[in-house]
Amino acid sequence: MKALILAGGKGTRLGEKTQLTPKPMLLIGEKPVLQHQVELFKSYGITDITFLVNHLSESIVEHFGDGSALGVRISYYNEREPLGTAGGLKDLEGILSEDFILLYGDVMLNMDLSRLLDFHQAKNSECTVVVHPNDHPQDSDLVEIDDSRRVTEFHSKPHAEGKFYRNLVNAGLYVMSPSILRYIKRGKKADFGHDIFPNICRKINMFGYNTAEYLKDMGTPARLEKVTSDYLSGRIERSSYKYKRACIFLDRDGVINEDTDLISRHEDLNIFEFVPEAIKRINQSEYLSVVITNQSVVARNLCSYDEVKVIHNKMEALLGEQGAYLTGIYFCPHHPDGGFPGENVNYKVNCSCRKPKPGMLLEAAKEFNINLQKSWMVGDSDRDIKAGRAAGCKTIAVRTGRSTHTSKLYPDYWFEDLTEAVSFILGNPYQKVVEKVDKHVVKNGVKPFVIAVGGRARSGKSSLSKNIEQWFEGQGKKVLHVELDKWILPQTQRGNAKNVFDRYQIPLLTKDLQSLIKGKKVTAPGYTIDPMAVHEPVTYDPSGFEIIILDGVVALSMPEIRELTHQKLFVKIDSELHKQRFFDYYHWRGKTESEIFYLFESRLKDENKLIDMDIDYADIVI
Ligand SMILES: [Zn+2]
């Protein structure tokens, strides 16, 4: 296969830099962007390359010659006058007898080209356009594709007011059949994006290949700088589908937008104000961001399949206005329970995509080559957590949804909202501590190694404990995570409880933990925050475990247990932040402001003051 590279651009937006050097010859790291492109083609066996040159072409010829130094064959076509991205191609009609690749000379990229070519072939495509979301869709030309990836429309900027389009932008790389050239007029200036594609997309077999790999033009000083730093950090190399990527999967309602129940009109979609910033931070990291949502509104016939897409287009537009984008959006339009008046029977099926089934996550993993074990599912319902777990992801529940109030949820981590969840995933605040603990475990060698994690309620103990658990499990060790909350007295039996130690039934807890550490099976009375729920006993069997984590407010409060503990951690928290979390938490549990205030004041006296004294026993204070 032949590759053509449009290397004639003037690069006027780069100012001084391109006065003496043509844009494609600017260095990214140690070599020109054009050389990066040539080497990528070469690595996929594409060695027949033509440069379309114009501005300052001598320096390109001087650098590349006939290409033999790089193991390729390079020929040159000198455009007498610049005819845009399409115009000059007409003169090459004679030498193009089979499908070819066309790439803009200012695009820094790394991608698995064999996947792209397979797609082109499988679709029997005449023209495949590589597309991706960007961080400024409102002033980009957008490409519309349908579920089969067929291109149905090109929307040039500026976009009409009140219209919402999917955030998919032409990335400047095409695979084409020579038959496309019949739509280009000889000697006339034309651009593919503006003049050719919008007119022919519905006439020919044209497809969009959506990828999360790295393709970015370096045509402004800021972009040149960004591309250079991405190259030097290795980010460009790692973005190729040759490697698996990690992803943050996001539920929609209650995580991204207010869950106002069965949203069937785009007017009813309101995204939380903190969400664009949180997603932008995901975009700046190397995680992908994919929405996974059940939308039974279609099966219930509250709106059509296409109307759900409009709602998603609005979501992408609102995010895009603030520089955030999603790698993909998957939704399940089905619902399993049929037989209701007015329903859309076509969608009343027991599908494999509706959460808690992991179907949509698995499909996304295939499309974007995702490593599910390194990925996260953030949701607000039992269904989200189960789907995430079934796919093999780590799970986070956030309290911004409605479902968290009513269902029993067992995520790996709890956070207030997406902002906190993303902060945790991206900058794991516990990593250093976990590594310290690891050193002790290795040095000490004792089995089971007992770790106690104490500190005030809502200080982050559970997150730290979960982190330690996942870290050691990642090494193949067996970890028993004991939640001391399971010994708390139920609300109804606390009449005589004077302080935190009475609430935790300390004598019983001490006795049970002593037995447990000695290798005996114990059964905790069980406790749940829901006063209406049944408190089911929980059995902990320590046999075969190499690490035991005692996670709870009173973990460092019992001298008999401290003696048996190999590593004592105390999680300290800033009082303002602690108060904030305390109020947020009890708001979520449905208490009134005055109830929370009263509770906070009494906990300060009968719990926090007592627990803070344990700090003196800690090996590590976090
Ligand atoms: Zn489904």
Image (tube, grey):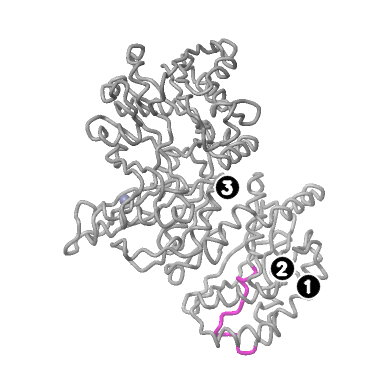
User: Which residue type carries mark 1?
Assistant: Asp
Q: How many marks?
A: 3
Question: Where in the figure is residue 88, as x and y percent of width and height?
Answer: 37, 22
On screen, residue 35 above or below 608: above
Which numbered disc flags the more N-terminal residue, 2 or 3?
A: 3
Element assignment for label 2: strand
Residue identifier under label 1: 614
The magenta stretch spans residue 485: yes
User: Which residue type carries mark 2?
Assistant: Gly
Q: Give the range drawn in magenta.
A: 484-496
Which circle, 2 or 3, is nearer the viewer?
3
Q: Which of 3 and 117 is in front in this view?
A: 3
Question: Where in the figure is residue 484, as x and y percent of width and height?
Answer: 65, 69
Separation of marks 1 and 3 at Cα, in angstroms: 38 Å
Q: Badges 2 and 1: C-beta atoms under 8 Å apart?
A: yes
**Label 2 neighbourhood size at 10 Å, few (<14), some (14-19), many (20+)?**
many
Residue identifier under label 2: 454
591 left or right of 139 in image: right
On screen, residue 562 above or below 51: below
548 left or right of 414 in image: right
Q: Any mark on residue 409, and which?
A: none
**Label 3 neighbourhood size at 10 Å, few (<14), some (14-19), many (20+)?**
few
Question: Where in the figure is residue 595, as x and y percent of width and height?
Answer: 55, 86
Separation of marks 2 and 3 at Cα, in angstroms: 32 Å
Question: Where in the figure is residue 114, as x and y percent of width and height?
Answer: 44, 25
User: Which residue type carries mark 3?
Assistant: Ser
Quadrant in which the C terminus is drawn: bottom right
Which numbered disc flags the more N-terminal residue, 2 or 1?
A: 2
85 left or right of 552 in image: left
Which numbered disc flags the more N-terminal residue, 1 or 3?
A: 3
Element assignment for label 1: helix
